[in-house]
Amino acid sequence: MSSDERELLQMELKMLKEAGEVLEYSYNTCNSIGLNKRHTFAEMDKFEALTSRFARTSDIMVQKIFRLIDAVELELPGSVIDRINRAEKRGDISSAETFREIRRLRNDIAHEYILESIDQLYKKAMELTPDLLDSVNKVIEVYSDK
């Protein structure tokens, strides 16, 4: 890995770490609220922050970190699914299937406008956030300069 690639990876990992920290904060906040049938507007704001941070963190992982690691390893760019599968083979994530689910949720978050479906997004984000955070921590541990 060239020094430029190493420097870029470290910058991206710093961004990922910060995104993971605010995602974890939102997750803990929403976990204390719980998944009620009806949320107050203030609670909905907290869940909106969670889903937004979930989407951002997964984008950083897939679109920046995995893409950069693939480039460093001289892999052909390929699709998002290719990047996820290679990340699983490297041991950067524990399950490609779970990460595909994370990616589908990220897409649903970006395109969801039906209010009745919002609670399902909140529930799914609460279910998948621990997996995403585990992957964030694993990637930071493996690739960060110590």
Image: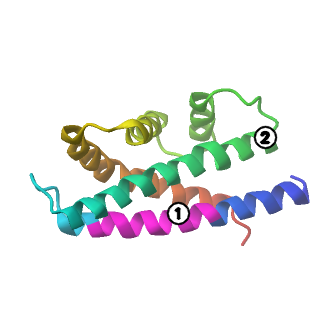
The disc placed on residue 71 is 2
x and y percentages locating residue 5 in the rendered image: 84, 54
Residue 104 location, x and y as percent? 42, 34
Q: Which residues are magenta?
A: 15-29
Q: SS for tag 1? A: helix
In the rendered image, the vertical position of residue 52 relative to residue 69, given as above or below: below
Q: Quadrant of the C terminus?
A: bottom right
Tell me: 68 left or right of 16.
Answer: right
- 1 and 2 marks in contact (CB < 8 Å): no
74 to 123, vertically: above or below: above
Residue 13 at least partly seen: yes
Residue 92 visible in rendering: no
Magenta highlight on residue 145: no
User: Between residues 55 and 135, which one lies in front from this camera angle?
Assistant: 55
- At 66% across and 48% down in the image, what residue appears? 64
Labels 1 and 2: the sequence-earlier one = 1
- Given the current orientation, which residue lies at the most extreme left position? 37
Which residue type does callout 2 highlight?
A: Ala
CA neighbours of label 2 inside 10 A, class few (<14), some (14 to 19), many (20+) = some
- SS for callout 2: helix
Please tell me whether the stretch drawn in magenta is mainly helix, strand or loop.
Answer: helix
Residue beneath label 1, please?
19
Q: Quadrant of residue 44?
A: bottom left
Q: Residues within 10 Å of mark 1 (few under 14, many from 20)?
A: many
Q: Is residue 122 above or below residue 140?
A: above
